[in-house]
Amino acid sequence: MNKVIASSVSKKFVMALAGLFLLTFLPVHLGINLMLLKADPEPFNSAAHFMATFPLIKVVEIILILAFLVHIFTGIVVQIQNWLARPLRYRSGNKSETSFFSRFMIWTGGAIFIFLIIHFTNFYFIKLGFIEGDAEDFYSVAYQLFAIPGYNIFYWICFIVLGFHLYHAFTSAFQTLGLNHRIWTPIVNFIAVFYAILIPAGFVSIPLIIWLFK
């Protein structure tokens, strides 16, 4: 039993570290995407080209993909372990103290994973040459996608879901790493709320502005 608990804790620890690393990537991605609001496509296309060709960025890209895979895999394993352990807790007569956000993390994570597959298909696979498209003009690719109402709605929903996922991920990661503190924890919770609102709102605003004003 102790081995099972230790295994679960270690997986949560790895998942937390991978998740925190991924959190540092989103503001960078948002900053580049905001260039889509410029009338001139050159800044966005230049930034996309730099991200695709600069050697150090390519190394970070590999680390990011590995972090995604580790985060997703450990999240699934931990959730399965929780599901398997749940009948034992029910038989003992104890009620689950799992938070609302925690109970739905696997489902919000699944929705984000579906979005990532579509996002990779529309952009990353073009860069790799797996799918036909102009890898030097992702500005036009983005505008073509944002011209599709159904894609915009799907995009907005996914980033709203991401906001819920980010909030719990941010707070639970610090808890998993044993960084709870009577002074710092409220500050971390405030930053988590701020981050979980600001980042998705930034991404959602881009297609909205393009749709309304471009």
Image (cartoon, grey):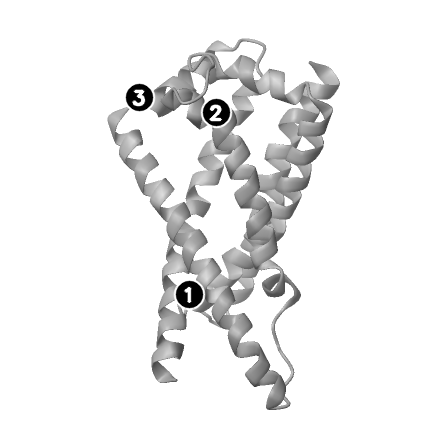
Name of the residue lying farthest toward the bottom: 92
Label 3: which secondary element: helix
Image quadrant holding the N terminus, namely bottom left
| Residue 141 percent coordinates (x, y) | 54, 16
Circle 2 sits on which residue?
123
Label 1: which secondary element: helix
Amino acid at pointer 3: Thr
Image quadrant holding the C terminus, namely top right
Residue 17 visible here: yes
Q: Nearer the viewer, residue 130 or 111?
A: 130
Circle 1/circle 2 CB separation < 8 Å: no
Q: CA distance from mark 1 to mark 2?
A: 31 Å
Q: Please give the name of the residue rendered at 38% of the width and 19% of the height, measured from the top-left corner.
A: 129
Q: Nearer the viewer, residue 131 or 27?
A: 131
Label 2 or label 3, whichever comes before in sequence order: 3
Q: Which mark is residue 53?
A: 3
Label 2: which secondary element: helix
86 on left or right of 4: right
Q: Which mark is residue 122?
A: none
Vertical side of 15 occupied by 137: above or below: above
Residue 184 visible here: no
| Residue 161 percent coordinates (x, y) | 64, 47
Vertical side of 98 occupied by 206: above or below: above
Circle 2/circle 3 CB separation < 8 Å: no
Q: Nearer the viewer, residue 66 or 26?
A: 66
Amino acid at pointer 2: Phe
Circle 1 sits on which residue?
12
Q: Please give the name of the residue rendered at 52% of the width and 15% of the height, measured from the top-left corner.
A: 139
Amino acid at pointer 1: Lys
Q: Nearer the viewer, mark 1 or mark 2?
A: 2
Label 1 or label 3, whichever comes before in sequence order: 1
Q: Nearer the viewer, mark 2 or mark 3?
A: 2
